[in-house]
Amino acid sequence: MAARKPLSPHFSIFLGMHMNDIAVPPANSVGIVSTKYFTFAQPPNSLTLVSGKTLSPVTLAYETYGNLNEKKTNAILILHALSGTAHAAGYHSPHDRDAGWWDDYIGPGKAFDTEKYFVICSNVIGGCNGSTGPSSINPATGKEYALDFPIVTIADMVNAQKHLIDNLGIERLLAVSGGSMGGMQALQWAVSYPDRVKSVIPIATAASLSAQGIAFHEVGRQAIFRDPNFNGGNYYRESPPASGLSLARMIAHITYLSEKSMHEKFGRRLQNSELFRFRFDTEFQVESYLHHKGLKFVERFDANSYLYITKAIDYFDLKAEYNGKLTSAFEHVSADFLVIGFTTDWLYPTVQSREIVNALRVAGKNVAYTEIETDYGHDAFLLPNDRMERDIANFLKRELEKANKESI
């Protein structure tokens, strides 16, 4: 899950300008940024996936903010949620109205302070925003992979990211952090590469998705499968399954909000009338909002990627390889942890955050836990929050001080 956050209030300076004007990003922005691409696993080499299938070649889209210090002790990897991209901060052009999806937290003086840290964010494999996924060209056929693309897991995503980090010459990351599916990737980094991660900040996430979460994903996938334009996934040169993908997003978006936030934002207010029309029109504001979210999502995301990424989230289970014991999964972890949960998040409820914290403590690991009171549900991790920003900033400050002392 990764909803687009509201426009920053600082970005109002962009909106009043003519298209020919050169806009100046806010002082606390990373400014104008560009997406880069790293390709690896060129034939005859390949990336071996958890399923046993292979992928070759593999491209990761990524962005970086700030500068890597001389000792390479200040690198932080940011991990995105379901529909996120490599564009986590800044703007792609002077007239770009949308800052990166975590721009409130990445930049000069922010939680992930780019005057102190070298911040990296990459689009996951299986995605549709520059990294290799089902909409990429299959070199064996010269056509889009579609459903010939192999199933990928969270571990596969992390393994691909490790190749990028190696290419950047970084031996050990100061931190890995993300919310929702990004938090799953952060946990997987700590377990898969314990010697490559100094600290972990998993936010609004879980060690495995609940049955309820899997159920919502399956309903969304079925909406896509049953769209008349789906055509077995081979729709790239035809009309895409826009109705199915839009419906999937509408269903999912309900899970990202809390009942209280929906009530306060919409209540039972009607959209364009004071009286019921007694027709099957879109009458309530909440209906209009969900339709808008669904239509906007279709403009920027691929239906096949939605299938693959939701399946990867469903498969994720840190306990599975350790006889159902999460403590055992963390036994060889060496990182320090800051776990963050939100009180009204019912998709990844705080009981799941506390499960991670308790398992880490039983395993004898250093862990701090922040539970934030909020009305905004799961989407709270994308929105400005003073406590979250302060706790992340203080945690990272301590970790960087330790890393610099260790490097002397």
Image: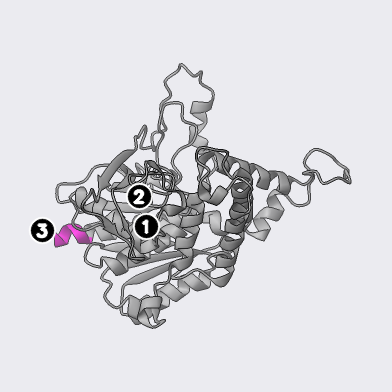
Residue 398 within the magenta-colored segment of the rendering: no
In this figure, which residue is indicated by the disc labeled 3? Answer: 408
**SS assignment at label 1:** strand
Which mark is first along the chain, 3 or 2? 2
Q: Indicate the position of residue 294 as horizontal and vertical percent values.
A: 62, 45
Residue at image location 45% in from the left, 57% down from the top: 388
Structural distance between the alpha carbons of marks 3 and 1: 26 Å
Is residue 258 placed above or below 320 in the rendered structure?
above
The residue lying toward the viewer, choosing from 206 and 363, is 206
The secondary structure type at the circle numbered 2 is: strand
> Position of 87 compared to 6: left or right?
left
In the foreground, 226 or 1? 226
Amino acid carrying mark 2 in the image: Phe
Q: Is residue 69 left or right of residue 246?
A: left
The C terminus lies in quadrant: bottom left
The answer to whether 90 appears left or right of 336 in the picture is right
> Magenta segment range?
402-407
Q: Classify mark 3: helix, strand or loop.
A: loop
**Color style of the picture:** one colour
- Mark identifier at residue 112: 2
Query: Which circle, 1 or 2, is nearer the viewer?
Result: 1
Residue at image mark 1: 177
> Which comes before the other along the chain, label 3 or label 1?
1
Q: Residue at x 77, y 47 (%)?
A: 284
Q: Residue at x 53, y 55 (%)?
A: 380
Mark 1 vs mark 2: which is more N-terminal? 2
